[in-house]
Image (tube, helix red, strand yellow):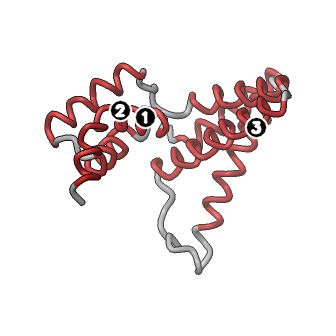
Amino acid sequence: MGLREEVAEDLKQAMRQRDEIRVSTLRLLSAAIKNLEVERTDLKNPAHGKPVTEEDLRSVVRKQIKMRDEAIEGFRKGGNTVAAEREAQEKEILQEYLPRQLSRDEVVARVRELVAEHGRSFPVIIKLAMSELKDQAEGRTISEVVRELTSEGRTAHAENP
């Protein structure tokens, strides 16, 4: 079963169970998926006519999660903890549609392997780490780990442009 079908089935199930947060979250995700499909019919879209892949659908889920992260941060800064908590619940629901997320320690271990193989060049390591771990960890975590583990290499690189 593909991601689109899984979301549709889960939405039906949530409606039967009267799970308001899950229903609204999955409806928004469904709408975002439908918007992607409609965008592909637009002649001005660079991806016009290309079929929607599972990777495209996972990308939609990642965008939805990122939107929730930004909303959580905004609500917390504004002191609205109730809204921040709801956004956090929605984020948890959305994360069910992505592969299991690696812990920070697992990301550190994988980035160390990349540094051992390819050196401490930040641009090289960040590109490799992002492409390899994009569905398995948050971009912010990957970026922080790469920055920490390549900091000596970045200093040397900055001195010798």
Quarter-of-image position of residue 41: bottom right
In the image, 131: left or right of 29?
left
In the image, 13: left or right of 158?
right
In the rendered image, residue 49, in percent from the top left (x then y), is placed at 51, 72
Going from N to C along the chain, the mark reached first, 3 or 2, is 3
* Three-letter amino acid code of the residue under disc 2: Glu
Seen at 25% across and 52% down, the residue is 159
Q: Residues within 10 Å of mark 1 (few under 14, many from 20)?
A: few
Seen at 58% across and 48% down, the residue is 60
Quadrant where the C terminus lies?
bottom left
SS of the residue under disc 1? helix
In the image, 53: left or right of 155?
right
Q: CA distance from mark 2 to mark 1?
A: 6 Å
Query: According to the image, label 2 marks what residue?
Result: 148
In the rendered image, residue 145, in percent from the top left (x then y), is placed at 38, 32
Q: Residues within 10 Å of mark 2 (few under 14, many from 20)?
A: few
SS of the residue under disc 2? helix
Query: According to the image, label 3 marks what residue?
Result: 74
- Identify which residue, 58 or 18, lies in the foreground: 58
Given the current orientation, which residue lies at the most extreme left position?
117
Given the current orientation, which residue lies at the most extreme front position?
159
Query: According to the image, label 1 marks what residue?
Result: 144
Q: Is residue 83 above or below residue 55?
A: above
* Three-letter amino acid code of the residue under disc 1: Glu
Question: Number of callouts in the render?
Answer: 3
Q: Residues within 10 Å of mark 3 (few under 14, many from 20)?
A: some
In the rendered image, residue 99, in percent from the top left (x then y), is placed at 45, 31
